[in-house]
Amino acid sequence: MLKISKLAAVGAIAVGMVTGANAATVTINNDMDITAAASSGAYGTNLRGTVTCTLACSGLFYTAGAYGFGDPGEMFNGPSSSGDANEALWVNSILGTSFTKTDVGANYQNNANAFVSAALYIIMKVGNNPNYLMIRNDSGVSQTFSYAQASGSKGGLSHTFSLGTPPPSPVPLPAAGWLLLAGIAGMGAMRRRKKS
């Protein structure tokens, strides 16, 4: 009986490893690498805000002459006039993509609203100088995003728009391996129990 209880506990841990979700918070700083008025901390601090997602996400940054995604992310000078066509062109200029205005999915929000999206890229218009940040959905599925303005910074969230479809998220092999081992061990225990 004790052996079966241990196997059940191992199985429960393995299931928890597969289903457990890790929330991510990405810090967003003023543009630190590209010369702009806000680089010296025109908003009182380099921290502009944070983006939280329920699964996994990363922020766009620029360093050593190249763009990347990670934490912290940065604010960038985007199109001077918002609109689906201008915003798609801005994203294309950074990522080398070929989105058009028909690919843009807009979600108009304010600082207090969380929103759900399955898009690959979430772009947020926040204040001005610099005024855009980009978040990549690293989960491969729909998740909830929210923006929190940093204390002392100026410029709230004006609106968001989304582009692209994330690739499907792979099942983590280590977790699948634990489940397989727990299942095999459980079948062995049941077989021994029937024999006795």
Image (cartoon, rainbow, N blue to C red):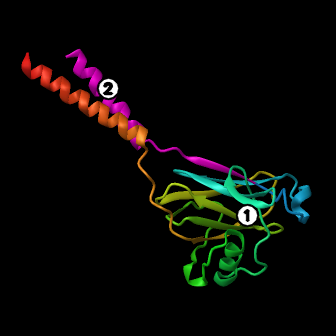
Give residue 178's quadrant in the image.
top left
Disc 1 packing (10 Å; few <14; some 14–19; many ≥20): some
Question: Tag 1's secondary structure?
Answer: loop
Residue 63, percent across and down?
79, 56
Q: Distance between the Cα atoms at labels 1 and 2?
A: 47 Å
Kind of residue at badge 2: Ala
Q: Which residues are magenta?
A: 1-28
In this rendering, would 172 be left or right of 7? right
The C terminus - image quarter: top left
Question: Tag 2's secondary structure?
Answer: helix
Kind of residue at badge 1: Gly
Residue 180, percent across and down?
30, 36
Residue matched to label 1: 156
Residue matched to label 2: 9
Residue 83, percent across and down?
67, 82
Observer-nearest of 122 and 193: 193
Q: Residue at x 81, y 66 (%)?
A: 130
